[in-house]
Image (cartoon, rainbow, N blue to C red):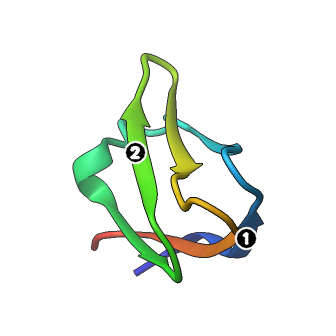
Amino acid sequence: MPILKDAVIIPLNRPLFIPKEGNLKVEDLVIESNGEYKVIDKQDYIIVQNDHCCRSIKVTIKTKD
């Protein structure tokens, strides 16, 4: 699986923007996280937002083969 983002820290209530390049879709992502997050699908970006109540989270985002 190709890695898009590796061990990125997302602070409280902050988003991480992933550009939709090469027909990337939410269904194509595999997200590994040490906390709660939510995924928002926008026209040009996929947003991964920290949804944990009281701390930063670390995420690794990969694409499916």
Q: Which residue of the protein is positioned furthest toward the top in this rendering?
A: 43
Please, what is the three-letter code of the amino acid marked with disc 2? Val
Above or below, 45 against 53 in this view is: above
Name the image quarter holding residue 4.
bottom right
Residue 17 screen position, x and y as percent: 64, 40
Please, what is the three-letter code of the amino acid marked with disc 1? Val
Residue at point 41% right, 49% down? 38
Q: Which residue of the protein is positioned furthest toward the left in this rendering?
A: 27
Residue 20 screen position, x and y as percent: 49, 34
Which label number is shown at residue 59? none
Q: Classify residue 3 as left or right of residue 64.
A: right
Q: CA distance from mark 2 to mark 1?
A: 15 Å
Above or below, 17 against 36 in this view is: above
Which label number is shown at residue 39? 2
- Considering only order in the chain, which callout, 1 or 2, is on the residue closer to the N terminus? 1
Residue 13 screen position, x and y as percent: 66, 45
Q: Nearer the viewer, residue 3 or 22?
A: 3
How crowded pointer 1 is (Cα within 10 Å; few <14, some 14-19, many 20+) is rated as few
Which label number is shown at residue 8? 1
Which element type, helix, strand or loop, lies under badge 1?
A: strand
Above or below, 19 against 10 in this view is: above
